[in-house]
Image: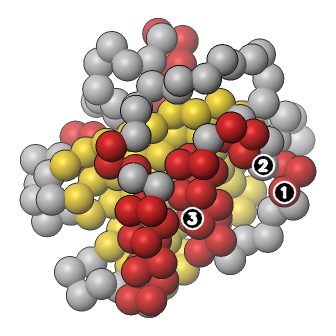
Amino acid sequence: MNYFPDNIFNDVSYNSYSSFLSEMKHESIYEMRSESSKHFYRLLLMRAFNNPIVITIEIFDNDYGKLHYIEYNIGELFSKNEIVIESYVNLSPEDVNNLYYVINEFDFWNAPSKNPYPTGLDGSNWIIEGLNNCKYHFIERWMPLRKDNVAAGIGLCMLGLSKIKIDIVYLY
């Protein structure tokens, strides 16, 4: 199963992100792109010193949506890849419109997919995917709170819609 287009990430990143999503049994939004009725956004937050987070939002034809938040343990205190927090949030049309506003305000669909900034050895990688009317796009950013308004704005919006409280210090 392909989770992302070929030749975008280096092999280590591609294998890391794809393996994690596959192991956690997440669907490939990329492979759904031929299904015109599908409308999804996903944030994959891979943090060097904290548990990874996946937020998936599905938007329905009636402008309601459903958000699925999962935080996984990476194996230090519990079994590897055990779910630590899982929650679902029903999104109102107002919530969905707020998400659309942020996506459009930051021009997500035209933002470069590849991370245009220098990276480091630790920190966090934020991968945001979108699928709407057979159009798929994603962006990858390292430490976006420091330098990338697109990933930071959309990612923080999705985290806010999840209603899970995360101290900003853990969103490096």
Residue 152 placed where, x, y %?
63, 51
Q: Is residue 59 above or below residue 147?
A: below
Task: Name which residue lies at 74% across and 56% down.
Answer: 84
User: Quick one: SS at disc 3?
Assistant: helix
Residue sitting nearer the eye, 71 or 58: 58
Amino acid type at mark 2: Leu
Disc 3/disc 2 C-alpha distance (Å): 13 Å
Question: Mark 3 = which residue?
Answer: 158
Task: Say the numbered circle drawn on residue 10.
Answer: none
Circle 1: element type? helix
Residue 171, numbered label: 2
Question: Residue at image x 72%, y 45%?
Answer: 145
Question: To which residue does mark 1 refer?
Answer: 168
- Crowd band around label 3 with a 10 angstrom C-alpha radius: few (<14), some (14–19), many (20+): many
The answer to which image quadrant residue 118 occupies is: top right
Amino acid carrying label 3: it is Met
- Please provide percent x and percent y for residue 101: 43, 72
Q: Are marks 1 and 2 in contact (CB under 8 Å)?
A: yes
* Whether residue 45 is situated above or below residue 161 in the rendered picture: above
Tell me if 120 is positioned left or right of 23 in this view: right
Q: Quadrant of the C terminus?
A: top right
Report if residue 23 is visible in the image: no
Secondary element under disc 2, as helix, strand or loop, is loop
